[in-house]
Amino acid sequence: MKNSVRAAVVSIAMVALVAGATLPAHAGDNQHISLTGGGVHFTAYGEILHATDSRKDGYCISAELKVGELTYGAHACGDGKVGYHDLDISEGKKVWLRGCYSTQRGTRLHWCSEWQGAIA
């Protein structure tokens, strides 16, 4: 009886190991920050930074993504406009996202959210 229980446990463990090996390796997470009049979003799969401006108020929405010492941006200016930046970031790398109100495509930041962490 002990041998049959041991064989069953080993079989279950092997099935779990094989099933786990076929899962996708991508382990990043998305991050979103809502702002009055728009929002910013980081999509981990494909490493895409988005900014959306949903209000005609004279301000642009700027998304900033900090990766180590580098900071990338995406900007949207005008009601219904969307801007994006397609990035190439190593999988599993820690990144930081924030959203800002700006003028002229991020040349002057007026107010920014706190930084929020994510994994590429």
Image (tube, grey):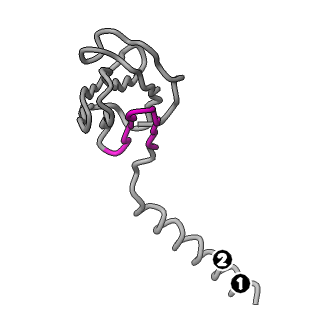
Q: Residue at x 65, y 77 (%)?
A: 9
Q: Is residue 51 visible?
A: no
**Residue hosting label 1:** 5
Dot 2 lies on which element? helix
- Range shown magenta: 29-45
Name the quadrant containing residue 92.
Answer: top left
Q: Residue at x 35, y 33 (%)?
A: 90
* Label 2 crowd bin: few (<14), some (14–19), many (20+), radius 10 Å: few
* Label 1 crowd bin: few (<14), some (14–19), many (20+), radius 10 Å: few
Of 77 and 58, nearer the camera is 58
Give how far across and how far down residue 5 sits, in percent.
Answer: 71, 84
Give how far across and how far down residue 97 sits, in percent.
Answer: 44, 28
Residue 34 inside the magenta-drawn segment: yes
Position of 2 compared to 49: left or right?
right
Residue occupying the far front of the picture: 57
Q: Residue at x 40, y 48 (%)?
A: 26
Disc 1, disc 2: CB below 8 Å? yes
- Residue 113's place in the image compared with 10, above or below, is above
